[in-house]
Image: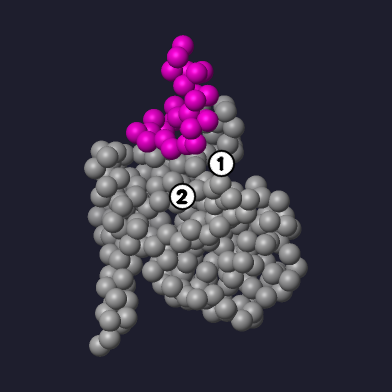
Amino acid sequence: MNEKVIERNAEQDFYKQYIERFNFICNKYADCIAMSCLQTDDSITSVTFSEMKKCCQKIADKIEEMGIGIGDRVAVVSPHSMETVLVGYGLALLHTTIVPMDVSLPKEELNRLLKFADVSGIYTTDEKYPLLDEDIKAEIPILKFNKSGELELYSDSVRKCTKSKQAAKDPEVAGIIFSSGTTPQAKGIMVTYEAVVKSRPVYIQVSGLKPGMKLLHVLSFNHIAGFMGSFYHTAEGCQLCFIAEMNSSKLQKGLVTFNPEFFAMVPKVYEVIQKKYVCK
């Protein structure tokens, strides 16, 4: 056995560890709330860890029907939501690479990054579907959740990926996060399962994270902290709390309703909250 094969086998263990942890937590806390969402009418929708696991497996099975599998890249073009994260977990179960997109980008830049990422499928919403270029729609399957909560293809979408898959598949890449940083154009940052697995205990040690705690999850999935934070908290048996329609009043309502131990946000928003509430 050569060195490259040995190295690949060692890397595969990180994905195995991630999946084993996901299954362990979903089984151990089967009847506990895994995700909750404050809806626009102030009602709360929740799923248990057992229900979450079943939903994610159904998502994985549906996407696999499209001819998408290990190492393929699938874009998530959707505003931050409970459904977005469920799709992310489903893609992880299928061992694909998640490419969460910033839906606030101009149409031209969004489509440029989708083509640059060489994705083989897209999950989106009716609101964002019109932003996709026609040549993208003609080559790869595009899915959404229907009113019954089932994942389905758009009526005018191809059933399977028909484009040539040029991307160098790397099954150990959990996700590709696009960030411009200090450069004019966004660059793709590859987040590996090794990074997810190895950084989780560090986060737990620093944060004091424990099973049953809550994260008010409002930081977008295409942000590295939002992406990694999802995995950290779920993998510890914590509850992810979402707000369906984000604005200042709903944020305040969410904080009061869920009373979370953790709330991650960009510094500017925290500064506003600090000035408005903490400093009074």
Q: Is residue 272 visible?
A: yes
- Where does the image place residue 45, in percent across and percent down from the top left? 48, 44
- At 66% from the left and 50% from the top, the residue drawn is 105
- Disc sitting over residue 244 in the figure: 1
Range drawn in magenta: 254-280
Q: Quadrant of the N terminus?
A: bottom left
- Where does the image place residue 39, in percent across and percent down from the top left? 55, 39
The residue lying furthest to the top in this view is 280
Q: Residues within 10 Å of mark 1 (few under 14, many from 20)?
A: some
Instruction: Of the two numbered discs 1 and 2 on the same chain, state the one appearing first in sequence.
Output: 2
Relative placement, left or right, of 120 versus 45 is: right
- Where does the image place residue 251, in percent across and percent down from the top left? 52, 31
Amino acid type of disc 1? Ala
Q: Does 202 appear in magenta? A: no
Residue 100 found in image quarter: bottom right
Estimate the spatial distance between the alpha carbons at disc 1 and disc 2, rounded to whole Å: 21 Å
Amino acid type of disc 2? Ile
